[in-house]
Image (cartoon, helix red, strand yellow):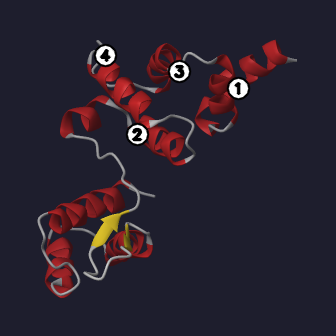
Amino acid sequence: MNENVIEIVSYLVKKIMHNEDVIENEQKLVQNLVNQGYEIADIDTAFELIFSSELYCEADNDQGSFNFSDSHRILDFRERFKLSLKVRGLLIRLTALNLINNEELEDILKKSLRFRQTEIGLKGFWRILQKVVDNPSRLSLIIENSPEFKSFNAEHRRYIN
């Protein structure tokens, strides 16, 4: 998924959170996004991501209200600038696969903001991850499920076998 789709999704989520009717104003939103320089294919992908996911489910009560069934952490601007694009993608995958929980995610983000480098790459992220996840078997599982850690994976296999 490219960065433009992520930006569009973020924009749409903000609109939804401010109780704007995204579906009713779809044409106006699309035209606004096109005027900002986004491509139609990216806009379509973003709309599909938002409206095909199960963000909410109907409640069992008679009022027909909706409840959020699952929530996802959105990075603030400091976190986005601090973490490289690869690291942001890796964080999304690790949380989606439940390899890190919400408390660990928050701890990782707090530690990353205190990191001295202006942008954290994979090696810096790995050091933070080792401090937060104190279970070697879970770290091993994270390495095995992360193609970004190919170099770590080779070293890791040498110690296991």
User: Can you tell which mark lies on residue 153?
Assistant: 1
Name the N-terminal-most of marks 4 and 3.
Answer: 4
Name the N-terminal-most of marks 1 and 3.
Answer: 3
Name the N-terminal-most of marks 2 and 1.
Answer: 2
Q: Mark 3 highlights which residue?
A: 133
Query: Which of the pair 37/30 is nearer the observer?
Result: 30
Query: Which of the pair 89/21 is nearer the observer?
Result: 21
Q: Which residue is pictured at 11% across the width and 65% down the height?
A: 18
Dot 1 lies on which element? Answer: helix
Q: Mark 4 highlights which residue?
A: 117
Task: Identify residue type, mark 1.
Answer: Asn
Name the N-terminal-most of marks 1 and 4.
Answer: 4
Task: Identify residue type, mark 2.
Answer: Arg
User: In the image, is 121 to the left or to the right of 110?
Assistant: right
Query: Which of the pair 59/122 is nearer the observer?
Result: 59
Mark 1 and mark 4: Cα distance apart in space = 24 Å
